[in-house]
Amino acid sequence: MFFLTLDLTSSLLENIKIDLSPSDIKIAYCQNSTIFSTNNVEITGVGCYNTNVYAENCIIFKNNKSVLRGGKIEAKKFIKAREVGSAIGVTTILKTSKEGLIEADIVYQNTIIMFDEIKFKIDEPVKSFKAYMEKGELRVENLKL
């Protein structure tokens, strides 16, 4: 009886197919959450608060008034945020690979930018923020807020 059950279970498992195609996630708002995507994450509304978001490709904040306060945002290729952190210095982490790009309209102090293991901390509010790796060196472009 035991072998029959084992054979049936093995047969069923062999016939199960898992769809591994990339999937996108679109959300308007999230708070105190963890989100995983096998492709892109789009935030279309007010933003993310104390949330961890992981995407295999890109994370893009579509709404011009979206905010990212607290938590960790990690995408392998591209992060486009609007307002990151807060004036009171909430710790917020933006992480990508060394081939990735991070852009934001406004970034407040105590925001940490990461390219794999390379870290850069924002000490004062900036605008028109862009960070990337070039020839093994971190490049950061921004204007004082």
Image: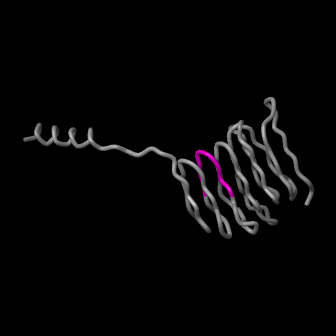
Q: Tell me the residue at 75%/48% (across/down).
A: 102
Q: Is residue 57 magenta?
A: yes
26 over 74 or under it: above or below: below
Question: Which portion, as a residue range, is magenta?
Answer: 52-60
> Can you give x and y, in whole percent of width and height, for residue 106 in the image?
82, 60
Q: Name the residue rendered at 80%, 48% in the picture.
A: 121
Q: Quadrant of the C terminus?
A: bottom right
The spot of residue 93 in percent (x, y) is 70, 52
Q: Nearer the viewer, residue 123 or 67?
A: 67
Q: Residue at x 65, y 53 (%)?
A: 59
Would residue 134 be seen by someone viewing this image from the given angle? yes
Residue 5 horizontal/vertical position (percent): 13, 42
Please tell me whether residue 84 is drawn above or below residue 28 in the rendered image.
Answer: above
Look at the magenta stretch and give its main secondary structure: strand
Q: Looking at the picture, how far across and down is residue 45, in whole percent?
A: 66, 69
Res. 10 image quadrant: top left
Q: Is residue 44 left or right of residue 131?
A: left
**Residue 71 among magenta residues:** no
Instruction: Examine the rendering and report whether any part of residue 69 can be seen.
Output: no
Q: Nearer the viewer, residue 116 or 40?
A: 40
